Image (cartoon, helix red, strand yellow):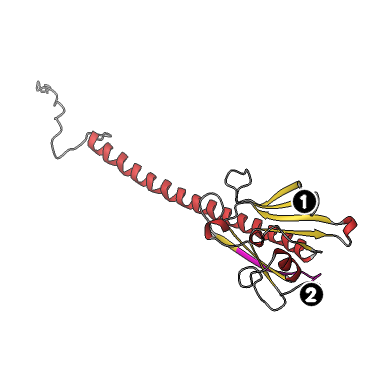
Amino acid sequence: MARSSLPARLPQPRTATEPHGPGGFTLVEVSIVVTTMLVIVGSFLAALNSVTNTGVRIQALVNNQETVRFGLDRLQRDLRAANPVDAPSTTGAYSNAMQIELGPNPGIRIVVRWFYDMTPTSSTYEALLRQVMSGNGASASVTSQVAVITRVRNLETNTPLFTYYDSGGNNLVSNNPTTPANVANCAIRVHVQVNSDAQPGPQPFGENIDVELRNRLPGGIIGCAS
C-alpha cells in the first residue's frame, strides 16, 4: 500500500487557553511569583530584625541593672564604714556628692568622695564617680577616680542622688535647712537614689538603697544641733 503524500502535521500556535508551552512561563507569571517571594522574605526579615533588636534592648537593660546594683553595693560598703562624714562648702552640695573618711584613726584614714558629675563639658558627664582625695581640706585634690556607673540620669528627673536623715527621721537638707557641718554631724542614715538608662536607646531603670552610718548609731555625734 502506498504511503500518503500528505505533509506532516505542523505544530499549532499557542492560543489564549494555552498560556504557556511545555516547561515555560510568561513574563507576567514570573513577575508575580518574584514579587510574592520578595514580600514574604521582607516580612520575615522585618520580624527577625524586630526580635533581634528586642533581644539587644533586653540584654542592655539587664547589664545596666547589674552595673547599677554592683555600684550601689560598693557605695553602701563605703557609707557604712564612714568615720566621719566630711562637710562640704555648701549644704546644696550634699545632694550630688558625699565625702567620707575610712579607717580606724586619723593617721591612716583614706578620704573618699562619691560624686555625680553634672558638668556637660566633662568627659565623665553624668557618671557616678568614686574619687580618692589627697586630704579632707578645701584644697584637697583627686588622686584617683573610677566611673562606677556611667549613665546616671538623675539630672533629667531633678532627683538628688543623696538624701540625709537624722535620728528623728528628719530630712536634714530640704525639710530642716541647716549648716553643712550640722548635716555632717547629725546624719545617721543616707538614702541613695540612682536613675539610669542603658544603651542602645533609653531604658529607664531606678534603684535606691538606705544606708545606716554604723559609726553614728544610735544618733549623731557631739555638736549635732538637730
Q: Which residues are magenta?
A: 207-223
Q: Quadrant of residue 32?
A: top left
Three-letter amino acid code of the residue under disc 1: Val
- Residue 10 colored magenta? no
Compared across the picture, whether 23 is left or right of 79 comes to: left
Main SS class of the magenta portion in the image? loop
**Residue at x-position 53% and y-position 53%:** 57
Residue 26 shows in this picture: no
Q: Residues within 10 Å of mark 1 (few under 14, many from 20)?
A: some
* Residue under pointer 1: 132
Label drawn at residue 217: 2
Q: Quadrant of residue 154?
A: bottom right
Q: Position of residue 153 (x, y in %)?
A: 57, 56
Compared across the picture, whether 140 is left or right of 65 comes to: right
Three-letter amino acid code of the residue under disc 2: Leu
**Residue at x-position 61% and y-position 55%:** 64
Q: Position of residue 80 (x, y in %)?
A: 77, 66
In the image, farthest residue toward the bottom? 168
Q: Secondary structure at mark 1?
A: strand
Q: Earlier in the sequence, mark 2 or mark 1?
A: 1
- Residue 219 colored magenta? yes
**Residue at x-position 69% and y-position 66%:** 179
Compared across the picture, whether 124 is left or right of 157 comes to: right
Q: What is the spatial separation of the Cα atoms under label 2 and label 1, in whole angstroms?
A: 25 Å
Residue 32 shows in this picture: yes
Residue 182 to residue 47: above or below: below
